[in-house]
Amino acid sequence: MINIALPKGRLGEKVYKLLARVGYGCDEYSEESRKLVFKDSRGEVSYFWVKPADVSVYVELGAADIGVVGKDILNEYNPDVYELLDLGLGKCSMCVAAKSDWKDDISVPLRVATKFSHTAEKYFSGQGRDIEIIKLNGSIELGPVLGISDVIVDIVETGTTLRENDLKVFTKINDISARLISNKSAYKFKGGEIKNIVAKLAEVIK
Amino acid sequence: MKFNLKEEDALNKITSLFERRGFRRFRSGCFEEYSLYRDNESFLVGKNVITFTDLTGRLMAIRPDVTLSLIRRTEIDGARTCKYFYNESVYRRATGGKDFREISQTGAEVVGRIDGLCEVELVSLMCETLGIISPDYILDISHVGYTEGLLSEFGDRREEVKDYLSRKDVHDFIKLAQNQGYGKELVNAFISAAELDGNAVEAIEKAKKTALNVKMKSALDELEVLVSRLSVAGLDGRININFSMANDADYYSGLVFNGYIDGVPHCVLTGGRYDNLLHKFGKEGGAIGFAVYLGEIERYFASEDVTVDCLIVYDDSSEDKALKLARDCLAKGKSVRLDRNADLTGCAATEIFDLTEGVKR
């Protein structure tokens, strides 16, 4: 039995449908159901829905053998897992954005509002730029608008939210998409089944 | 999941394993100068060290690891083989934990003159150690010569490629390969190294097909000899080749090992050939060793129940009677626990004498 952690929400549902297409569907599954755990009748797979940012925790601690998680989360938390496949779903990018008329003043530390503090620290230390992190949990765009930060580091999908708040992207840090990850120990003991799932998924997303 | 044995029993069995092979016990104090760990930070499992200033103002550390103390303190001579084992507490962050903890570390080190036999003996000991904890184990083996040989082909991109290799991340490597215009041979060598993870004999055959240079080929030759000797001992079925281990080539110079147990989500045994560390200390010869961190897997061991022959349950009115009965049982060579409660958690008794009602149950 392979335990699979899926991120709650649209991405997780898309991934489930991909898995169902390659033979890992469950009768118990329905989009309306609020059940957190469901299994297939043959006992090959068991799925559970978790908060997207927690998928890597479940996989690293072995509660799930494999899981699907955004590259943004992997970059931020650097979990000790194998990263086996780029599913090409949930594509977006990690960006530095600011008010469209913003000019950098390198004589003072840059104030960066973000949920992704490690990502921001790593990026700016690579640039040799002193920063002050302002850790926010949502509505990051408000940082520059209300003047508590100079820039934000956040995920940008279409850029609509940025435009509507008079912000624009200054730098793209990296591309993000959903990745299939595996617990290292599970990969030793259930390697055959895991490699099977990876190969079948790789075939359908080609 | 729970193992079938207690932590203490596992430890005793592992200790006796080392003693039966003529390994000498190494003991050391708990404190070392902090510089020992600062200078060899990437040799440590965890980077955080507890430090304090001693009475003469030196910055000291409470040891987070035993191997460094052993290498520093023992006389090592390139012409002779010394075999040590230890079982000591170390102080560091546990894997995945946030706070400092006391963790028991048990391991063996062979230093000085190392030949092929020493390596086979030590790998067998790793397998036996893992086998004591659980029969469902796998020992991953890699060779720094192979991974370094591969990474040397990537010039200034080696750190990035090393990161992809340690995560088995082929998709991001392919993007890099397309950007950099790497040749087919190089791309295939990486993909083969990243995807290899399985039975040693087959894996070595596969790896041979994509080996790019002398360094990679001679590492495979070494692995092949080792695996064939291990299969004579019947151990090949539990041995995997896996080149996705992030080991620091500043310390490790040959074989490297990670041990896994089914049901435990992280690696429980680490080890390798670390001649380079020895040379950093200005010592001659070679070194190979491994450690298991039983303290990190303590939750998987069977609980440490107290087992006695007789449990005597008493109340205010039967205290004297209970004392007499206990003396009688002890005189017969039985073990006894006196308690006011019959339903003790964590205590199993063969016989229960309930003196609150005067009935033997």
Image (tube, coloured by chain):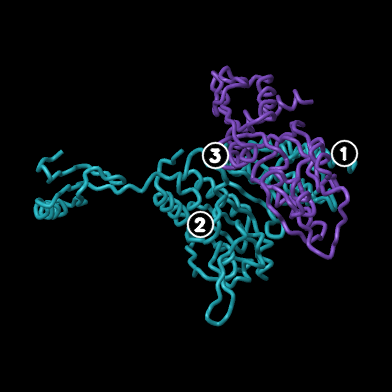
Chain colours: A purple, B cyan
Label 3, label 2: how far apart the Cα atoms are? 27 Å
Where residue B140 is drawn, which disc sits there?
A: none
Q: Nearer the viewer, residue B254 or A100?
A: A100
Q: Are marks 1 and 3 on the same chain?
A: yes
Q: Are marks 3 and 2 on the same chain?
A: yes
Q: Is residue B243 visible?
A: no
- Left or right of A53: which side holds B107? left
Q: Nearer the viewer, residue A118 or B16?
A: A118
The amino acid at mark 1 is Gln
- Percent of width and height locating residue A63: 55, 37
Q: Earlier in the sequence, mark 1 or mark 3?
A: 1
Label 1, label 2: how far apart the Cα atoms are? 45 Å
Element under disc 3: loop
Position of the N terminus of chain A, as image quadrant, is top right
Chain ID at mark 3: B
Q: Earlier in the sequence, mark 1 or mark 2?
A: 2
Q: Circle 2 is placed at which residue position?
A: B105
The amino acid at mark 3 is Gly
**Mark 1 and 3 residues: CB-CB less than 8 Å, in contact?**
no
Q: Is residue A71 above or below residue A192?
A: below
Furthest-right residue in this view: B181
User: Crowdedness of circle 2 by 10 Å Cα count: few (<14), some, many (20+)?
Assistant: many
- Percent of width and height locating residue A17: 68, 22
Q: Circle 1 is placed at which residue position?
A: B178
Chain ID at mark 1: B
Chain ID at mark 2: B
Q: Residue at x 76, y 25 (%)?
A: A205
Q: Circle 3 is placed at which residue position?
A: B234
